[in-house]
């Protein structure tokens, strides 16, 4: 969106006659684009705008913007000047970035939109020419929904064949007596497991997007739940040549075996399992030597599961983005790991549903700790 605006500004700065070329660019994008001259008259208006407002281009060019762009509030009342973005931007000079508004179309149907509005010449204070980019929220949501439906169906359909291939490879491993073939089968097994996880993440990610995740909170004994996951984690971590440690004493630095208090939380056990699985899986994948520790501790009001590793760590600049969908720290090693960038997005979405927080603490080159903090259920 800001790209579109920069193109217009750039061409204007070079004093290239914008009219034809700007029109060409504007007609080629789906968003609605409108440019107003200093009198508030429409000097550029693209097909996207015509679709959105129902006003044809030839009818709108040269009109005052208020005749075409009718902003209304939730009660279908016209927006007063104090709230009209085209008025406020000229008053306080601040760009409006992706704000929610409602436009009344020519046929009086109300369309929710996202509007980005800025001055065409931001460097000139008195400049009154404006460029607005409009996005139809319903269409955008519809496209998002279609995309997530497709991912959801495709990944669901892939599950059965993947599980069956995995089963047959396991059978072949049992029957096989050839060392070389065993090596190939093990590799195939590892890859098919990765593929299974990838589809599982895509499916869960799509369900999170659709708000289609079931939420069945119950009282959980967190000590028990973690202990039930430990044998599997221990095996996988040790298979990678790393050491595993479980720390259920209240002091994370102490390696002494002390009797752990029992911690109860109210949450969906399937969600808690997915969150912990995800964090342990990341700790394993991004740690090339050393430890992975799973710990549990608590205070009067909160319970904390932490997953600590001595892995490659995460740069400060990446920390705020970790939970964004598809965010992957960009370096060659992570690419090799073939992740989706969905794991932490899923973990955070599930944590939110269960009133939990995930807090990452990491030092590049030294390792990371991910704390999952739940409100403690008093017993
Ligand atoms: P994925 O692992 O599929 O790439 P995630 O959402 O699980 O996606 O993680 C996002 C990014 O955060 C990863 O690409 C990785 O760079 C970084 N990351 C996550 N956990 C760790 C960890 N324990 N140690 C180092 N980096 C991590």
Image (cartoon, rainbow, N blue to C red):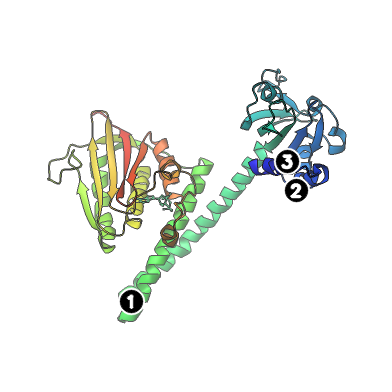
**Location of residue 145 (image quadrant):** top right
Pick whichever of labels 3 and 2 is earlier in the sequence: 3
In this rendering, position of residue 181 left or right of residue 295: right
Residue closer to the observer: 377 or 330: 330
Report helix, strand or loop for mark 2.
Answer: loop
Cβ of mark 2 under 8 Å from ligand 1: the answer is no
Q: Is residue 1 visible?
A: no
Residue labelled with disc 1: 182
Measured from the top left, where is residue 352 in percent x and y?
Answer: 41, 36
Residue labelled with disc 2: 28
Q: Is residue 289 visible?
A: yes
Q: CA distance from mark 3 to mark 2?
A: 22 Å
Please state, as top left, top right, bottom left or bottom right, where the C terminus lies in the image: top left
Name the mark nearer the viewer: 3 or 2.
3
Name the residue rendered at 36%, 45% in the picture.
275
Q: CA distance from mark 3 to mark 1?
A: 66 Å
Measured from the top left, where is residue 207 in percent x and y?
Answer: 50, 46
Pick whichever of labels 1 and 2 is earlier in the sequence: 2
**Location of residue 301 (image quadrant):** top left
Pick whichever of labels 3 and 1 is earlier in the sequence: 3
Residue closer to the observer: 6 or 205: 6
Residue labelled with disc 3: 13
């Amino acid at each position: 969106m800001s790209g579109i605006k920069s193109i217009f500004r750039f061409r204007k700065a070079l004093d290239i006659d914008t009219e034809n070329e700007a029109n060409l660019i504007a007609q080629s994008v789906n968003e609605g684009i409108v440019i107003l001259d200093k009198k508030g008259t429409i000097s550029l208006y693209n097909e996207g705008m015509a679709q959105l407002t129902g006003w044809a281009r030839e009818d709108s060019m040269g009109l005052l913007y208020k005749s075409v762009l009718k902003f209304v509030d939730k009660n279908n009342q016209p927006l007063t000047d104090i709230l009209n973005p085209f008025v406020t931007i000229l008053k306080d000079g601040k760009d409006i970035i992706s704000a929610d508004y409602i436009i009344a179309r020519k046929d009086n149907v109300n369309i929710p939109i996202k509007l980005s509005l800025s001055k065409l010449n931001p460097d000139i204070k008195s400049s009154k020419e404006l460029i607005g980019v409009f996005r139809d929220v319903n269409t955008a949501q519809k496209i998002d929904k279609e995309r997530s439906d497709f991912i959801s169906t495709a990944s669901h359909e892939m599950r059965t064949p993947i599980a069956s291939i995995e089963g047959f490879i396991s059978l072949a491993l049992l029957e096989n007596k050839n060392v070389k073939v065993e090596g190939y089968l093990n590799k195939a097994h590892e890859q098919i497991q990765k593929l299974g996880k990838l589809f599982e993440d895509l499916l869960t990610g799509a369900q999170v997007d659709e708000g289609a995740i079931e939420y069945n909170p119950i009282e959980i004994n967190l000590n028990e739940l973690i202990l039930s996951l430990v044998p599997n984690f221990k095996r996988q971590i040790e298979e990678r040549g790393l050491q595993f440690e479980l720390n259920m004493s209240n002091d994370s630095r102490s390696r002494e075996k002390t009797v752990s208090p029992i911690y109860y939380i109210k949450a969906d056990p399937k969600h808690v399992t997915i969150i912990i699985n995800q964090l342990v899986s990341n700790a394993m994948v991004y740690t090339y030597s050393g430890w992975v520790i799973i710990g549990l501790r608590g205070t009067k009001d909160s319970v904390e599961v932490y997953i600590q590793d001595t892995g490659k760590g995460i740069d400060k600049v990446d920390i705020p983005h970790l939970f964004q969908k598809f965010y992957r720290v960009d370096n060659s090693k992570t690419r090799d790991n073939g992740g989706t960038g969905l794991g932490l997005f899923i973990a955070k979405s599930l944590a939110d549903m269960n009133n939990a927080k995930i807090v990452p603490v990491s030092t590049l080159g030294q390792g990371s700790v991910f704390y999952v903090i739940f409100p403690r259920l008093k017993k």
